[in-house]
Image: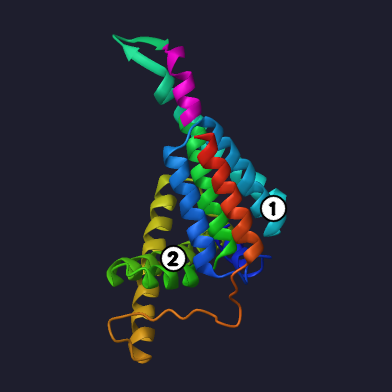
Amino acid sequence: MIRHFDMIAYHNRLRCLRPEQKTLFSFLLLLNTMVGSRGTHLFIIFWLAIWTIGYAGVSWKVYVKTLGMVILFLLISWPILLISLDSWHISVNRGNIPAAIDVSLRSIAAWSCLFFLLVTTPFPELLYVLKKLKIPSVMIELLFFMYRFVFVFEQAAEELYTAMKARNGGSHWRHGAMLIFQLWQKIWDAYHALLLALRARGFSDELVYIQNETCGVWSKRYIVEAIAGMGVLIWMR
């Protein structure tokens, strides 16, 4: 799934927009999500669905599937907000239902902002924007390594799971423990390989991120539409 999102980020209709424009747009909407009302959240969810599916050309099946996973996760957390346990007596506090709905809508709106940025902007370009914003290098490098090892983890897990199935691996807990140990070992080996590769290429304690200048334009149309939408959000507040 992560690799699929990364592929979409490199092959979408908004790919050639400046990463600064998409990042600023997403974070301004995220700020509105944090301070906005229920109507604001609904507007952001609907508006970003148009941008993600209509403008960026992301498959609606991918969008709906990912949104469904988010909604499922939120529904699983509802019992924590609604159910109270007192002296082994379980009761449902219906008064917390509006608060649960508000939290869920705010979470979905925040997810919409970050998902839009994820599927329209390649991660190295996001790191380039963070570097221009003078974010400390150590934080950017931590993000880079986390991004790199998400792919390593996913690929190693798939390979080990396939190998175990091919060898008629059982479902005993010892097989799961062996799988976890081998997964950890593969990731550790990949980490050492990455360090050797960086040193072989003259790594000097700071990673360099380069923006693809041949594919980076500021769209006046999208700027005007974003300003108009922000005006609607301010009016709704």
Does residue 197 appear in the picture of this structure?
A: yes
**Is 231 placed above or below 166 here?**
above
**Is 108 placed above or below 151 here?**
above
For the stretch drawn in magenta, what is the main secondary structure?
Answer: helix
Q: Which residue carries the number 2 mark? A: 147
Q: Residues within 10 Å of mark 2 (few under 14, many from 20)?
A: some
Look at 45% across and 30% down and name the residue there.
Answer: 77
Look at 55% across and 70% down and name the residue there.
Answer: 18
Give the camera-side residue of 13 and 47: 47
Give the camera-side residue of 70 and 45: 45
Give the camera-side residue of 200 and 234: 234
Residue 22: name its quadrant.
bottom right
Q: Earlier in the sequence, mark 2 or mark 1?
A: 1
Question: What amino acid is labelled 2 in the image?
Answer: Tyr
Return the x and y of residue 147 as percentages of the image width and height: 44, 65
> In this rendering, would 57 be left or right of 195?
right
- Whole-number angstrom distance, CA of label 2 to CA of label 1: 24 Å
Q: Give the magenta-colored segment's residue range.
A: 92-102
Residue 42: name its quadrant.
top right
Q: Residues within 10 Å of mark 1 (few under 14, many from 20)?
A: some
In terms of secondary structure, where does tag 2 sit?
A: helix
Return the x and y of residue 180 as percentages of the image width and height: 40, 56
